[in-house]
Image (tube, rainbow, N blue to C red):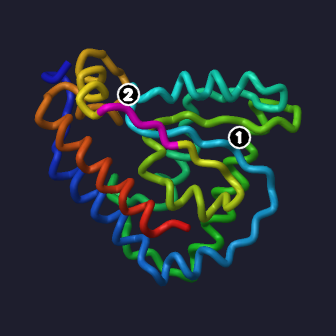
Amino acid sequence: RKKNIKFLINDEKKEFKNIKKLFSKTFLKNSLNIKNENISPIFILGMPRSGTSLVEQIISTHSKVHGGGELNYFNELIKFYFYKDNKLNSNMNDDDIVEIFNNINKNYLDKLSEISKKKFIITDKLPINFKWIGFIKLIFPRSKVIHCTRNPKDNCLSIYKNYFTNIELNYAYNFNELVNFYNLYKDLIKFWNFNIP
């Protein structure tokens, strides 16, 4: 698998750095003025193989919750609006942010309505959404974010043992790259915990 994929840890480091750069205090202050009263989903996220599937199964046993599975909608919308030439644009104009966030909100909720016609709360358990916790809390202020964690060694070994077709997991086939990516993830989670109310 490793021979057939492209993965550069330095590109990942730049992306994570740019995510943090984008969430300047000015950006947060402006974005937090967004008002949204829509019912929002439950985001279940973390590293792959950290227990997100089990948590979703437990939550979706509730009569008013629909398990959506690994939805790529939010990830795709962030990349559509905030990426250019496959790179995160960390120099967004603040004047455009509110409009972009409202567009993402509407498009995402429209997609969710296609999954369940009933007014259920829908779970979204795409693990890579840990990158977008800041976006999630600003676009869906009333949403719930459940961050699943597992012993780091167990988590990394479980990832390394599995075969994934998703290109978001191209770090999984070299143990040094996997550990480096895991450390980037942990650092970003610390950043979100410190900066997102």
Left or right: residue 124 compared with residue 153: right
Instruction: Kindly identify the amino acid type of the residue bearing the numbered disc 2.
Output: Asn
Taking depth in this image into account, of 3 and 180 the one nearest to the observer is 180
Left or right: residue 19 compared with residue 114: left
- Residue span colored magenta: 147-151
What residue is at 73 percent from the left and 39 percent from the top? 112
Residue 115: image x %, image y %? 75, 30
Choose the circle earlier in sequence order: 2 or 1.
1
Q: Secondary structure at mark 1?
A: helix
Q: Are marks 2 and 1 in contact (CB under 8 Å)?
A: no
Residue 192: image x %, image y %? 43, 61
Q: Quadrant of the N terminus?
A: top left
Q: Which residue is mark 2?
A: 166
What residue is at 47 percent from the left and 26 percent from the top? 51
Q: Which residue is mark 1?
A: 111
**Secondary structure predominantly adopted by residues drawn in magenta:** loop
What residue is at 79 percent from the left and 50 percent from the top? 39
Taking depth in this image into account, of 76 and 126 the one nearest to the observer is 126
Instruction: Kindly identify the amino acid type of the residue bearing the numbered disc 1.
Output: Lys
Tell me which corner region of the image, top left, top right, bottom left or bottom right, holds residue 89. bottom left
Q: Secondary structure at mark 2?
A: loop
Q: Would you say residue 48 sits in the magenta stretch? A: no
* View extreme (front): residue: 151
Instruction: Give the answer, above or below, for where 81 lies relative to 109.
Output: below
Taking depth in this image into account, of 55 and 33 the one nearest to the observer is 55
Left or right: residue 99 compared with residue 13: right
Tell me which corner region of the image, top left, top right, bottom left or bottom right, holds residue 37. bottom right
Tell me which corner region of the image, top left, top right, bottom left or bottom right, holds residue 100. bottom right
Q: How many marks?
A: 2
